[in-house]
Image (spheres, helix red, strand yellow):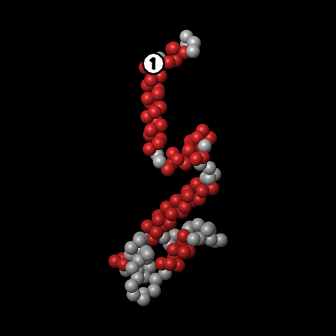
Amino acid sequence: MAAIRLDDNVDNIENTLCSALLDTKGIASVTKWGSTTSDPLASSTWDKVPPNKILLTPVQCKILWRQYRAETEYCEANKRSNNWLPPPWAIVALIILGFNEFLTLLRNPLYVGIIFIGYLMLKALWVQLDISGEFSHGV
């Protein structure tokens, strides 16, 4: 997908990408005589491909490959650290409500709103009637 190839012209884009990106030793490696091999993806054009047929330059391919590797490594690390437990609020809700009431709340979230409004009404009555003050004198 790096270049438009509708005719039978031979190019070495696939070989260049495989050798440069899938090489585990790194792009620029040092030979045993001390010289370094150049990065085949450091240019802005492909060999044997006219500029008007290039969709992705070698530099863009290198950047996309690095981004892909970073995202897949992040996803793999996230999968390894995930412990497959439900969130803490769900565990507390299961303990307090029980399984069947918890599923009822999940199926109809309107109940959560009704419970919240009921809580607010009871809290307002508690404050307005000063029930804690009345309890301080005894039941």
Residue drawn at x 62%, y 53% as measured from the top left: 84
* Quarter residue 54 falls in: bottom left
Q: Where does the N terminus fall, quadrant-wise?
A: bottom left
Q: Which residue is mark 1?
A: 129
Left or right of 42 in this view: 80: right
Query: Relative to 116, is 105 above or below?
Result: below
Residue drawn at x 60%, y 43% as measured from the top left: 98
Q: Residue furthest front?
A: 139
| Residue in front for this viewpoint, 107 or 15 | 107
| Residue in front for this viewpoint, 113 or 46 | 113
Amino acid type shown at disc 1: Leu
Q: Residue 7: percent from the left, percent from the top?
A: 39, 87
Q: Residue 63: percent from the left, percent from the top?
A: 47, 64
Residue drawn at x 55%, y 48% as measured from the top left: 103
* Quarter residue 33 falls in: bottom right
How many callouts does the rendering have?
Answer: 1
Kindly state the secondary structure of the residue where label 1 is placed.
loop
